[in-house]
Amino acid sequence: MKYALGFFPTDLSMQPVEFGRAAEDAGFESIWFPEHSHIPTSRRTPWGGREGAPPLPEHYWRTHDAIVALTAIAATTDRIRLGTGITLLAQRDPIWTAKEVASLDVISNGRVIFGIGYGWNLEEMENHGINHQKRRAIVREKMLAMKEIWTKDVAEFAGDHVHFDSLWSWPKPTQKPHPPIVIGGAPTSVTFRHVIEYADGWMPLYGRFPIVDHVATLRARADEAGRDPASIEVSVFFAPQDEAVIEELRSAGVDRVILPVSSRPAAETAPWIEELGRFASRLG
């Protein structure tokens, strides 16, 4: 089992460089930063897209840019892996994003894990000019286009949502053929089809559905599609600090648990990282 930390780094919280150093010192395999370009004030879409959800916490609209924050950490750490948890790819330009992620992978000496997702905040997507009903198809094409840029000296792409003529773009990622791609999302047929087609892992959010059952389903569908189920890594985002839960996930074949750290100042966060490190060490 790999142990990781998930954290919303904001202007009011422990800052990214300090967080990264503390997480590496505590022995964690990776850290995962989410992103939102902004949060519309209308709040028409409930938190997570779930009716009846509590009010959205303030750290959602105070979050640092994830790529920038992870790049700062890359320059000040040696070992810890750097995950985006998750990049809202539908809202991003795929050519720019391919260059940013490849640059981070080179600067970090191959430590990037590229977590992507479809998004839940409809107003946020609309402000980026995205039709939310097509976001899953858009994410798929943008990711396929990025893989072309990462792996080809001359890349081009023609799809329904992404199109560019032949281009050059360097640097290429240090990891070959590219950083691992992890899709964060619910266990739907679309998510599983995308994971099997073009990704290296699935990252569900703990507490939304019975993950254990769906891990087996994903791997069975991968086998049916002719893909080695062992080539798909399963990470559970914001897993609880609960030994029984983590042992259940381990037994189900989950490869990584990402423990949540509250978005608080360094004086409160640093001791919590140390405690989580001791917890992970005890479980092994």
Image (spheres, rainbow, N blue to C red):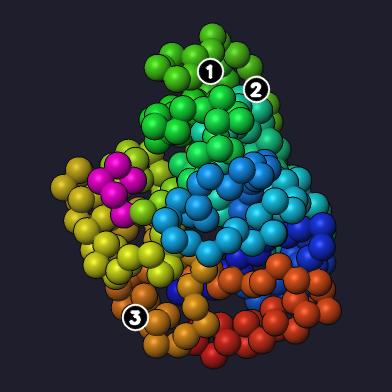
Local packing at callout 2 (Cα closer than 10 Å; few below 14, some 14-19, many 20+) is: some
Taking the view exactly as shown, the residue that stands out farthest to the top is 165
Q: Reading the chain from its start, which is encountered first: label 3 or label 1?
A: 1
The answer to whether residue 239 of the structure is visible from this angle is yes
Q: Reading the chain from its start, which is encountered first: label 1 or label 2?
A: 1
- As drawn, 253 above or below 242: above
Disc nearest the viewer among 3 and 1: 3
Residue at the image position 63 percent from the left and 48 percent from the top: 35
- As drawn, 282 above or below 65: below
SS type, badge 1: strand
Query: Is there CB contact under 8 Å for labels 3 and 1?
Result: no
* Residue 109 x, y percent position in the rendering: 69, 49
* Residue 122 x, y percent position in the rendering: 50, 39
Q: Which mark is residue 116?
A: none
Q: Which mark is residue 248?
A: 3
Tell me the CA gap for discs 1 and 2. Answer: 8 Å
Local packing at callout 1 (Cα closer than 10 Å; few below 14, some 14-19, many 20+) is: some
SS type, badge 2: loop
Tell me the CA gap for discs 3 and 1. Answer: 44 Å
Left of 123 or right of it: where is 106?
Answer: right
Residue at the image position 52 percent from the left and 55 percent from the top: 47
* Residue 277 x, y percent position in the rendering: 64, 82
Residue at the image position 43 percent from the left and 56 percent from the top: 50
Give the residues drawn in magenta, as a range: 187-191
What type is the residue that disc 1 sits on? Ala
Residue 109 vs residue 258, the one in the foreground: 258
Q: Reading the chain from its start, which is encountered first: label 3 or label 2?
A: 2
